[in-house]
Amino acid sequence: ESNSFVTNLASSLSVDTETLQKRIDELSTFSDTPAPSVTRVLYTENDVLARSYIKNLMGLSGLSVREDAVGNIFGRWIGNEAVLAPVATGSHIDAIPYSGKYDGVVGVLGAIEAINVLKRSGFKPRRSLEVIMFTSEEPTRYGISCLGSRLLAGIESLAKDLTSTVDGQNISFLDAARSAGYAKEHNDLSSVFLKKGSYSAFVELHIEQGPILEEEGTSIGIVTAIAAPASIKVDFEGNGGHAGAVLMPNRNDAGLAASELALAVEKHVLESGSIDTVGTVGILELHPGAINSIPSKSHLEIDTRDIDEKRRNSVIEKIRQSAITIAKNRGVTLSEFKIVNQDPPALSEKSIIEAVEAASKELNLTHKFMISRAYHDSLFMARVSPMGMIFIPCFKGYSHKPEEYASGHDMENGVKVLALTLAKLSLQ
Ligand code: GLV
Ligand code: MN
Ligand code: MN
Ligand code: MN
């Protein structure tokens, strides 16, 4: 009985694309930088306003809303068999400096719209359906990516480290969380951990952040695996000095050490033998930062990823060796080489891949299987729940810049596939 209902469901799903777009535009105004760029950083005033905006929409959709100690937000539609593990979906709304309005947001506002779509269709879930807005998928403020989902996955070392982590302004994580209304009770963040089996499935809708779907004219990407990300912090220290007076042979320039390491990162990545290996030095800071002062300190943050974990790890090891050699040759001190995270890849669950594929077919949407080169909260939700992801095309594959764009029609397709997938999984 339930199966024929779901088969008929495909044709009765209607997405309110206009409202979805209006909400995406409204949410984008909670930003620290001018439009069309979006900058929304963890626990800032705009982040707190955006959170209220999301909670309000969850309420309007009839979801019961709960928040945990770090501000992961959960909105639940209680199913007919509420004792069963729910099916969850969601993504993030924080935005790196000068980025766009679709990264993550499509997977939160789109998930809320998917709930609305199912409610309008008359569908009643068996398992409860839950929309999750994850805290700080982006590493902007505390250097930790997927902070909320890592904690949900029960990473104890992170829960412990966060109690002594500070941002660039020396504001502690706990103080920042408290200023946003979280972490009130105590310093123990282990209350955030999910028990394995808390969800029967987790599905994330996201823009592709790559050009393939648009180029091929394919509507839906079904993610089979998420590439393995890593990030590293490096500090060099030298003696600094006067840019005119200190002669070249007498210098130990921490800035040049950093520059040389940045080029070494590129070299090691290119020499991996695979196009799938990538590396980026996205942060490079010089101290004191004056034109007539030799840099006495430099700070780099390196992002490197691969679908092959071993190959990614060997790149990290080569970067480490280069940092040591460069410091020695230039007479500077390598005062820090810290691997902040070095995560394995994650595989999607077969049953969820199949549910997304069946949903795409029933909706007559073209689809293809693909890997995610970007990381997502799904990488960590996969540790506590069967996981799957749905990609939609985005303009020229642009992401992490203001030109990021997904069309109303592509979002409509993504929301429909998500809604139908959630419906199927809720009946399983
Ligand atoms: C997510 O924002 C990523 O950097 O992959
Ligand atoms: Mn991002
Ligand atoms: Mn994202
Ligand atoms: Mn540092």
Image (cartoon, rainbow, N blue to C red):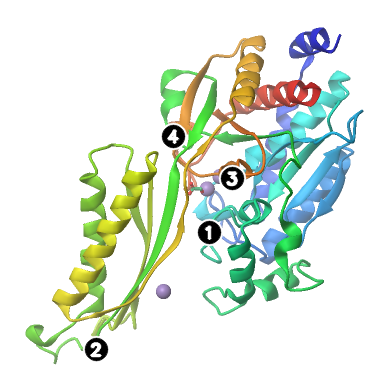
Q: Image quadrant of residue 159?
A: bottom right
For disc 1, does the CB lie below 8 Å from ligand 1?
yes
Q: Secondary structure at mark 1?
A: loop
Task: Give ligand 3's quarter of the image.
Answer: top right
Q: Name the residue rendered at 14%, 92% in the picture.
A: 245
Task: Give the Cα separation between the discs numbered 3 and 2.
Answer: 43 Å
The answer to the question of whether label 3 and label 2 lie on touching residues, with beta carbons closer than 8 A, is no
Q: Secondary structure at mark 4?
A: loop
Q: Residues within 10 Å of mark 1 (few under 14, many from 20)?
A: some
Q: Tag 2: residue type?
A: Asn
Say left or right for 158 vs 224. Answer: right
In space, the residues marked 4 and 3 are separated at their CA atoms by 16 Å
Residue bearing mark 3: 101
Q: For the N terminus, which image quadrant?
A: top right
Give the labeled residue for mark 2: 239
Q: Quadrant of the C terminus?
A: top right
